[in-house]
Amino acid sequence: CPNFLFLVSKADTRHLSFSILLPPKDDLADELEDVDFEDPGNGEDNEGWETEDEMEAEAEQDDSELTFTKHTGSVFCVSLDPVTNSLAVTGGEDDKAYVWRVSDGEVLFECTGHKDSVTCAVFSHDSSLVALGDMSGLIKVWKVESKEEIWSFEVGDLAWLEWHPCAPVLLAGTDDGNMWMWKIPAGDCKTFESPACQATSGKVLPDGKRAVVGYEDGTVRLWDLKQGNAIHVIKGQDGHQGALTCLACNKDGSLVLTGSVDGCAKLINTATGKVVGVFSVEGGRAKGSKDEEESNSVESVGFCNILPLIAVAYLDGTLAIYDLSTQGLRHKCQHEAGIVHLQWEQSSSVVSTCSLDGVLRLWDARSGSMVSEFRGHTAEILDFTLNREATLAITASEDNQAKVFCLQRPDR
């Protein structure tokens, strides 16, 4: 090659200028004899070069309005304050939690002192308190107004954490099978014991008097919170044949929907404790397999508030919409990757999902068609929540970020 030296001037990606320092004239002919010159053609062959538009197109699509970047590890959980929907709390792999403003991402305060990944983060019913739990079982409650920690307690490995719907009472489920209930901040405590089997999921019913808890052995228990006894125990053939992964109740608490690694969702009447419906998609278990891990696990379930519909999300990426009145399958909405979580809008037939491909999607349950999708995360979305009007979604992802998406829809 000739000994040409190119000096590249400062320029943008569209314009590059060059200065060529030539060798002495006598040597130039000899230098050029060894160079192969190709026909420049019409100058349109720009292989290896990109226009500015092409470079922009290759950049990651980000539909979010705001990205929260304070976490230095995966963000596992997110919750909105229920009164104003203006504050979010996120917990992460970095053993930290932050309470921050949804409008601009400004941190109100950092919740410190955890010893392991913060996997549970929830506001109380009146938004005055925020409870945080880490994987080691350390639970802390902070007062939002004063930004002060007002209570803490340590249990065994924590599975779930939930506030009472109308009182400063906190409930938690642990790996040893216990459900705990505390008055905050006094700390008065009650435990609901069951056989040594992880309490994998739990929810207080809307009446505030009962809680439903699912266990690793497939059992479901309906507890009387005041008396401390199990009103109903659903087990054996009535229960699931594998660990419970999720549960939800309808608006008046008369029905509970449970999901399990066994690939089934079960509908339970909370008054009688009877299973009144079983839902599964075809091929729910790998053919000839008895291994739970090979079954098509149910990852999330939920009730529609305005129509007799339920949604069941599966690990294989299927979102199934069932009709409660006929218990028939209405629609199968296929995702490109496993679904992590679903949430119905409060006053419509739209259900939102997040999945392992890092995309948030909105589906119309009446037609089974996708309304819209929102991209921006570079790893799986691990949790999300909607505001009351379903105009905003806040997501938590393995890419160390939480994002705020504006859910623009044609009907708004």
Image: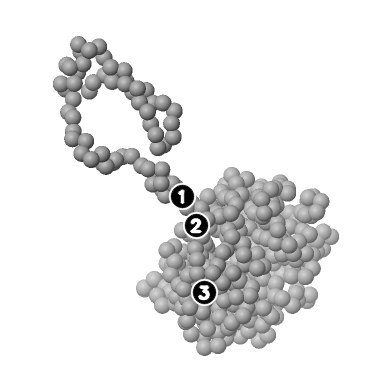
Residue 276 - label: none
Q: What residue type is labelled 1?
A: Glu
Assign a secondary structure to mark 3.
Answer: strand
Q: Which amino acid does label 3 sit on?
A: Asp
The extreme front residue here reads 42
Q: Residue at 67% across / 54% down in the picture?
A: 103
Per the image, the residue denoted by label 3 is 364
Upstream in sequence: badge 3 or badge 2 = 3
Count residues near mark 1 (Cα–Cα under 10 Å), then give few for <14, some for 14-19, many for 20+: few
Viewport quadrant of the C terminus: bottom right
Upstream in sequence: badge 1 or badge 2 = 1
The extreme right residue here reads 186
Viewport quadrant of the N terminus: top left
Count residues near mark 2 (Cα–Cα under 10 Å), then give few for <14, some for 14-19, many for 20+: some
The colour scheme applied to this rendered structure is: one colour
x%, y% of residue 344?
Answer: 59, 72
C-alpha gap between disc 3 and disc 1: 27 Å
x%, y% of residue 348?
Answer: 60, 75
The extreme bottom residue here reads 326
Q: What residue type is labelled 2?
A: Arg
Per the image, the residue denoted by label 2 is 375
Q: Are marks 1 and 2 in contact (CB under 8 Å)?
A: yes
Q: Are marks 3 and 2 in contact (CB under 8 Å)?
A: no
C-alpha gap between disc 3 and disc 2: 19 Å
Assign a secondary structure to mark 2.
Answer: loop
Per the image, the residue denoted by label 1 is 60
Assign a secondary structure to mark 1.
Answer: loop
Is residue 4 shown to the viewer in this render? yes
x%, y% of residue 179?
Answer: 69, 67
Residue 244 relative to residue 370: left or right: right
Q: Residue at 58% across / 83% down in the picture?
A: 308
